[in-house]
């Protein structure tokens, strides 16, 4: 028996490859199929099943492409209604993978079709639990993403989740290994651990949602309290996972096309087109194509793309280091942004050399900000939870997550802007520049300010 966790930090997502005696199963694969096909070849096994814990909202699964390439059967839990060839399992139905078996436990609550997969060894002993978005380490799946599809309130879904956890999961052995669908950083939960593997016994002892003496009403209140609005791209990804999508190979072929300055300028000039600059934030501020969004590929690229680029079908024109083109196209496709038209050959340097306009964003060092003695307002675009720990005196908190809905809250005159380390503030600065707002970015953000000796207001 071999279980391989393929954890993708950008999405805080865990996919799994299980192999035994010539056969394999993949659980919740990401969009690109190559890693799973490579694993199968290395282990000399044939992928027999692709198990999907639910219709994911935060990323586009690779289930359809992988099934086409391998002949594997896609398996969902009860009540799922996919629009492509798939097998909808019954509760407690068992599937053989080599000498192993996988039992489907229907655990609705996060979504109605949500299911957990219980792995048993050749002797029939329970070994591991693949919990998808039903149970995380330190948390559980949020119950507000499937309200429309289920025609239920989030409180009703939370009640179902309570029942699923107590009746299907907490009754299992403490020594079971728990493999969750997500970890810290995912928007699918509130307070996930940075760990990616644990035992069920430890989760029973430490996870707030698994308290033995917890009532149903207490669970509903705690699970629904403090939920932030999900990113706007979530419903679109869920629809793609349910109804199908374009082949990843076609997306990669189209997106990796090198465009001349003239081709790039002509295409990106269309009203619905988007220029996405995926270079490092410090490089972006020194020179970029006017109107471009900065979302550096070195950070939490895909989730911020989903928040900042509001039209998932818009034609995207990439500015990125040429050795990162394929990476950018795949990571965009992971969250459903399939319409990349190509990248600017020669980058901003070629754009500049052609005589076209290049914009900049003014930046200052933390020391220069301190010396300036706050001659301009300060906006902190970190999340409110970060801001509430400590912040610059008199700073205004406008989290990047809500930049569009709070555009009217930004100062009407030039102001300083910062985040924790400089990544998010440059994203915000690019959005604001596109809207004609003038900002001055503080290099290194909060961390740089603390290092330079800037006093902070600490919250009690």
Image (cartoon, rainbow, N blue to C red):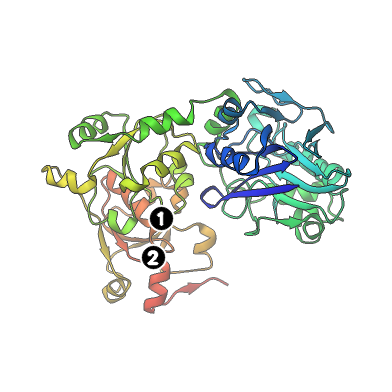
Task: State which quarter of the image contains the C terminus.
Answer: bottom right
- The quadrant holding residue 441 is bottom left
Identify the residue shown where x is 47% and y is 36%. 333
How far apart marks 2 and 1 lie (CA) works out to: 9 Å
Relative to residue 442, is residue 273 depicted above or below?
A: above
Mark 1: secondary structure:
helix
Locate residue 360, reporting x and y percent.
22, 53
Q: Are marks 2 and 1 in contact (CB under 8 Å)?
A: yes
Residue 424 is tagged as 1
Identify the residue shown where x is 82% and y is 58%. 201
On the picture, is 269 further left or further right than 53? left
Total numbered labels: 2
**Which of the marked residues, 2 or 1, is nearer the chain's N terminus?**
1
Kindly identify which residue carries mark 2: 445
Locate residue 90, reporting x and y percent.
81, 27
Locate residue 265, reporting x and y percent.
21, 34
Mark 1 crowdedness (10 Å alpha carbons): few <14, some 14-19, many ≥20: many
Identify the residue shown where x is 66% and y is 44%. 16
């Amino acid at each position: 028996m071999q279980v391989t966790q393929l954890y993708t930090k950008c999405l805080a997502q865990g996919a799994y490859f299980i192999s035994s005696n010539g056969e394999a199963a993949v659980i919740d694969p990401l969009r690109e199929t190559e890693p799973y096909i490579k694993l199968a070849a290395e282990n000399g096994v044939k992928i027999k099943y692709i198990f999907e814990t639910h219709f994911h909202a935060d990323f586009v699964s690779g289930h359809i492409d992988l099934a086409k390439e391998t002949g594997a059967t896609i398996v969902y839990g009860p009540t799922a209604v996919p629009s492509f060839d798939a097998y909808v399992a019954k509760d407690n139905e068992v599937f053989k993978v080599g000498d192993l078996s996988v039992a489907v436990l229907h655990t609705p609550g996060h979504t109605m079709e949500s299911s957990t997969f219980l792995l048993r060894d050749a002797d029939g002993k329970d070994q591991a639990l693949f919990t998808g978005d039903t149970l995380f380490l330190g948390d559980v799946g949020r119950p507000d993403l499937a309200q429309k599809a289920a025609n239920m309130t989030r409180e009703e879904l939370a009640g179902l989740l309570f029942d699923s956890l107590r009746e299907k999961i907490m009754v299992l052995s403490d020594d079971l290994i728990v493999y969750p669908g997500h970890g810290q950083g995912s928007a699918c939960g509130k307070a996930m651990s940075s760990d990616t593997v644990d035992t069920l016994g430890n989760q029973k002892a430490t996870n707030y949602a698994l308290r033995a003496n917890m009532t149903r009403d207490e669970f509903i209140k705690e699970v629904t309290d403090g939920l932030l609005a999900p990113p706007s791209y979530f419903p679109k990804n869920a629809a793609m996972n349910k109804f199908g999508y374009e082949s990843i190979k076609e997306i990669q072929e189209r997106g990796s096309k090198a465009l001349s300055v003239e081709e790039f300028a002509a295409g990106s000039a269309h009203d619905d087109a988007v220029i996405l600059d995926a270079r490092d934030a410090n490089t972006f501020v020194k020179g970029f194509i006017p109107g471009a969004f900065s979302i550096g590929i070195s950070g939490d690229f895909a989730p911020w793309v989903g928040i900042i680029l509001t039209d998932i079908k818009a034609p995207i024109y990439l500015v990125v280091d040429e050795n990162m083109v394929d990476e950018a196209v795949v990571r965009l496709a992971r969250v459903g942004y399939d319409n990349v038209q190509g990248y600017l050959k020669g980058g901003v340097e070629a754009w500049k050399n052609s005589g076209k306009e290049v914009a900049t964003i003014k930046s200052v060092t933390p020391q220069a900000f301190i010396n300036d003695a706050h001659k301009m307002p300060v906006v902190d675009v970190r999340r409110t939870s970060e801001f509430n720990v400590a912040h610059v005196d008199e700073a205004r908190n406008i989290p990047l997550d809500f930049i569009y809905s709070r555009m009217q809250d930004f100062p009407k005159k030039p102001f300083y802007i910062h985040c924790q380390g400089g990544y998010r503030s440059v994203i915000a600065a690019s959005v604001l520049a596109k809207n004609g707002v003038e900002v001055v970015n503080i290099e290194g953000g909060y961390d740089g300010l603390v290092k330079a000796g800037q006093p902070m207001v600490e919250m009690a």
